[in-house]
Amino acid sequence: MPTVSSEELAAAAGVNSAKLRKDFSYLGSYGTRGVGYDVEYLVYQISRELGLTQDWPVVIVGIGNLGAALANYGGFASRGFRVAALIDADPAMAGKPVAGMPVQHTDDLESIIEENGVSIGVIATPAGAAQQVCDRLVAAGVTSILNFAPTVLSVPDGVDVRKVDLSIELQILAFHEQRKAGEEAAGEPGTVLQAPKETGKGPDGDVPAVMPA
Amino acid sequence: MPTVSSEELAAAAGVNSAKLRKDFSYLGSYGTRGVGYDVEYLVYQISRELGLTQDWPVVIVGIGNLGAALANYGGFASRGFRVAALIDADPAMAGKPVAGMPVQHTDDLESIIEENGVSIGVIATPAGAAQQVCDRLVAAGVTSILNFAPTVLSVPDGVDVRKVDLSIELQILAFHEQRKAGEEAAGEPGTVLQAPKETGKGPDGDVPAVMPA
DNA sequence: CCATCTTTGTGCACGCGTTCACAAAGACAT
DNA sequence: ATGTCTTTGTGAACGCGTGCACAAAGATGG
């Protein structure tokens, strides 16, 4: 029976072994003292807890470049996601195959959601259409939305929204890049003030909490 | 002179006003007691600190659906980013206009980086090509990389890499979705163990630290 | 010029998460 | 069986960030 110790896993992941054990303990006691964790069993338990063992049908609304990229993205299937439908408002897109699947028109959004039991929707439309699409998705029964449009969506309680801003990551890189460049010329008064300390805990460690939208 | 108080800003952002004032104080003392912060001056100071006032030339390598989506993304310009070049390995792509800009061939990667003084690169290639592209970018002088390919890149010290996994966000939504569904049927032994407490601090608050790559 | 009122900037205390350290548990050898 | 050795699971301590509370600063009015 192949096993791993918390020490090995911690070293591989670059975290503290005690933290790892404590995290695992919240899922139950799946380890064997003196031996470690049964790899296969552990993987299954974590997968189950994260929802990887379930099949999540999702719809992607807005089949532009980004929507098409998402539809073609291979990582979804292995994570338990199944693209149930691609939806676009452009009648010219309807029926066209994208990622081996015909694009459907927005008119059929509600019936598609219902028939496939979709609870997760992905919005990759232009900013102007996002809120309207969001409202229709929610009305049709979607309770989780992944929003790639550069808009803040308002949704009723009980609906989760996650906003992905492709430029925020670049922003963070640029912030660090600026820090690198400023290091050799540090100390000039009134130009770049140092943050109180460098935690070094993670890539986000020294990014200010407040960023403009 | 239009001003805002830390109280107003905190209410708008949904954070504590003391935290906000303390954060601002790390950038310097830009407020006026009894009045608040001069909006225009504050915006400028924060923009400068975040690097928004600088012009960051970036190259996008891999002009598939995702690369094209990024090239067309409007949010970059307003954040101080300028797409200096689009690069692809496919000779058939060379010269084709994407987002009003001709795609250039990978052969010219090094000269493009050098001529434009690019220090930030975006990788949107297939997984198989990512590391090789990364190596060439780094060798050419790029010190920050935004990686959309589903690979972990290895880079020398001093180079920053941020990995964007489009499915991880879906993963998080699915995790919460599962929790929602499990709530009415909670308490069954051995199925879904509760995390010790619900912090409610943010959308990532109750996501386990360890997730499979 | 003094009094009052508003809001900043920050010392300090609290609370939470991380880490340490160790007892308990189980494997394995004798 | 008994002892030894490894590794888990977790109580307790530590450290850091968040929020409270207030003194200092400056505006504003009389």
Image (cartoon, coloured by chain):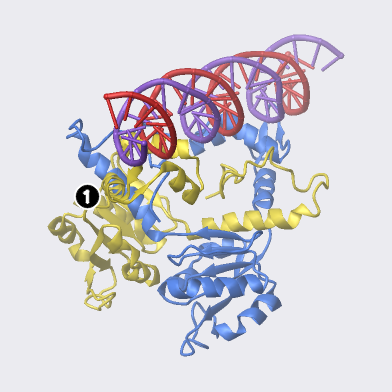
Chain colours: A yellow, B blue, C purple, D red
Left or right of B100 on screen, residue A59: left
The residue drawn where x is 71% and y is 56% is A180
Q: Residue A151, percent across and down?
A: 43, 54
Q: In this view, does B211 lie above or below B82?
A: above
Q: Which of A210 and C13 is in front in this view?
A: C13
Q: Is residue A148 left or right of residue A139?
A: right
- Residue drawn at (46%, 59%) of the image: B164
Secondary structure type for disc 1: helix
A158 or A176: nearer the eye? Answer: A176
Residue bearing mark 1: A139
Can you tell which quarter of the image residue B86 is in? bottom right
- Residue at position x 66%, y 67% from top? B119
Residue B137 visible to the viewer: yes
One can see residue B84 in this view: no
Identify the subunit bearing mark 1. A
Q: Hey, what amino acid is under mark 1? A: Ala
Whole-percent x, y for residue D25 in the image: 78, 25
Furthest-left residue in this view:
A115
Callout 1 environment at 10 Å: few (<14), some (14 to 19), or many (20+)? few
Give whichever of B96, B209 is nearer the camera.
B209
The picture quadrant where one finds residue A193 is top right
x and y percent of residue B108 in the render? Answer: 61, 84
